[in-house]
């Protein structure tokens, strides 16, 4: 059982806390990403991007990299369509963890830096919209530092486009 918002972690990107809106109306999960740049590594499509894990804080960011598993047209909440990179990462929610597909998009104007869509929740979560933070509590005292995680992915075999 989860609430309509939860703190989740994306350890592959050294993000130990990002507030996610649990959105059964959205098919696909999304994370706020900027400075998105595709490149090739060992013949595969990869993407480098930065993430602001906290709302109203543009000073803290994480530099991330992941293999691109798909490109997908997504209709956003305003009705606009955009083609997005799709990556796979491990999601940690409470004591549970599983791989999810995530699209990369600019969510800077949105209330949440991450959206957990119904495909990622399927057969795993029950959502009670009257609750918040059922499996995770906000930690207002947590210090987060800028990270260079995933830079090792760019050190060998990279071909910039």
Image: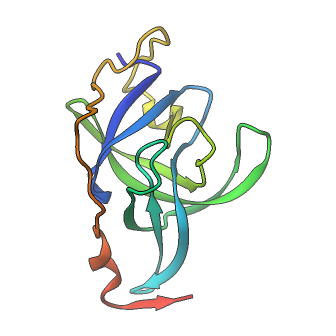
Q: Residue at x 30, y 87 (%)?
A: 155
Horizontal arrangement in the rendering, residue 34 relative to residue 74 (left or right): left
Nearer to me, 108 or 2? 108
- Quadrant of the image containing the C terminus: bottom right
Specify whether 95 is left or right of 43. left
Residue 98 picture quarter: top left
Q: Residue at x 40, y 48 (%)?
A: 53
* Residue found at the far top of this picture: 130
Residue at figure coordinates x 38%, y 65% from the top left: 64
Nearer to the camera, 119 or 134: 134
Side of 101 where 74 appears, left or right:
right
Q: Position of residue 71 (x, y in %)?
A: 61, 62
Q: Position of residue 132 (x, y in %)?
A: 40, 17
The image shows a total of numbered marks equal to: 0
Apparent side of residue 38 relative to residue 144 in the rendered image (left or right): right
Percent position of residue 26, x then y: 61, 33
Q: Position of residue 78 (x, y in %)?
A: 77, 39
Q: Residue at x 45, y 11 (%)?
A: 128
The correct choice, above or below, for 64 with respect to 111 in the image is below
Instruction: Name the quadrant of the N terminus.
Output: top left
- The single residue placed furthest to the left in the displayed view is 95
Colour pattern: rainbow
Q: Is residue 133 above or below residue 82?
A: above
In this view, 48 is above or below 56: below
Report which quarter residue 104 is drawn in. Answer: bottom right
């Amino acid at each position: 059982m989860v609430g309509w918002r939860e703190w989740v972690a994306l350890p592959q990107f050294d993000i130990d806390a990002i507030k996610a809106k649990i959105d059964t109306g959205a098919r696909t999960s999304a994370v706020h990403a900027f400075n998105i740049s595709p490149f090739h590594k060992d013949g595969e499509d990869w993407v480098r991007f930065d993430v602001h894990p906290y709302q109203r804080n543009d000073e803290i960011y994480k530099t991330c990299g992941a293999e691109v598993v798909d490109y997908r047209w997504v209709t956003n909440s305003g009705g606009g369509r955009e083609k997005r990179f799709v990556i796979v990462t491990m999601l940690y929610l409470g004591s549970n963890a599983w791989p999810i597909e995530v699209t990369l998009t600019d969510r800077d104007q949105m209330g949440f830096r991450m959206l957990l869509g119904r495909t990622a929740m399927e057969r795993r979560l029950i959502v009670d919209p009257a609750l918040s933070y059922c499996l995770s509590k906000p930690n207002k005292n947590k210090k987060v530092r800028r990270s260079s995680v995933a830079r090792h992915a760019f050190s060998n075999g990279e071909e910039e486009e």
